Image (cartoon, rainbow, N blue to C red):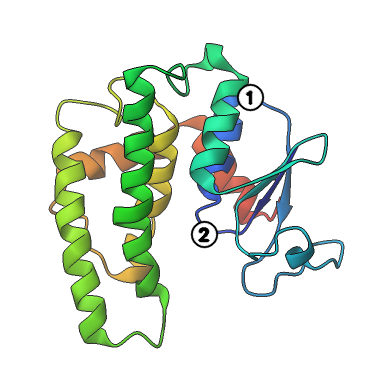
Amino acid sequence: MKLYYSPGACSLAPHIVLREAGLAFEPVLAPTKTHKLPDGGDYYEVNPLGYVPLLELDDGTRLREGPAIVQYVADQVPTRNLAPANGTLARYRLQEWLTFIGTELHQKFSPLFNPNMPDDAKKIFRERIAGRLQFADGQLAGKDYLMGEHFSVPDAYLFTVLRWHKPTGVDLAPYANLLAFMERMAARPAVQAALNAETQGK
């Protein structure tokens, strides 16, 4: 398998999950600014949408969108318990978290990276994010991870999105449970391995 990624982007989430799964894969750097691949190719020829992540399976099949990719990866190694079984209420809870993170956090963080976005508009997005962070913080009360005591794929996505708080000026200080979650996640070997690989461009 190949995972097309860009450092600092949401592709970190499936990168973490692949390492948690223990599956063999090749990380392929696909910078979102240049779209030039290490071999000189044009990433748009791989993904016409131009963004990451994209997972290419061994047979050439390509999967886009992080929430779909992380569930696919989890289902390849059910003994790792990265996601509950399909058809169970717990699986729908997992999908609920993936959707919440994607639409209520990821989507609201994105405009804050736009240098042309007026400060007044950025203030509005930060206020909206604060409300969602307060909710997530409350949901983590008394739990190590979103789904309980064990890591599952939404945790990788939440960790990835929350890492954007510094470059976007979003304050995490009021959210003790989220801060503890971030420390817990950062200590995981798979998370450290993914971050180190992306830092080194591997």
Could you tell me which residue is drawn at 37 percent across and 57 percent down? 106
In percent of width and height, residue 72 lies at 58, 31
Amino acid type indicated by mark 1: Gly
Tell me: 30 left or right of 81.
right
Q: Residue furthest top?
A: 79
- Total numbered badges shown on the rendered structure: 2
- The residue carrying mark 2 is 8
The local secondary structure at tag 1 comes to: loop
Marked residue nearer the N-terminal end (2 or 1): 2
In the rendered view, tell whether residue 77 sits above or below residue 45.
Answer: above
In the rendered view, tell whether residue 153 sits above or below residue 112.
Answer: above
In contact (CB < 8 Å): disc 2 and disc 1: no
Could you tell me which residue is drawn at 80 percent across and 68 percent down? 42
In percent of width and height, residue 132 lies at 20, 53
User: How far, Cα to Cα, is label 2 from label 1?
Assistant: 22 Å
The local secondary structure at tag 2 comes to: loop
In percent of width and height, residue 100 lies at 31, 46
User: In the drawing, what numbered circle is on residue 74?
Assistant: none
10 Å neighbourhood of mark 1: few (<14), some, or many (≥20)? Answer: few
In the rendered view, tell whether residue 59 sits above or below residue 53.
Answer: above
Could you tell me which residue is drawn at 38 percent across and 51 percent down? 102
Could you tell me which residue is drawn at 39 percent across and 24 percent down? 91
Amino acid type indicated by mark 2: Gly
In percent of width and height, residue 29 lies at 71, 57
Tell me if residue 173 can be seen.
no
Quadrant in which the N terminus appears: top right
Given residues 51 and 150, the one toward you in this image is: 51
Tell me if residue 122 can be seen.
yes
Given residues 7 and 36, the one toward you in this image is: 36
10 Å neighbourhood of mark 2: few (<14), some, or many (≥20)? Answer: some
Tell me: 196 left or right of 139.
right
- The residue carrying mark 1 is 22
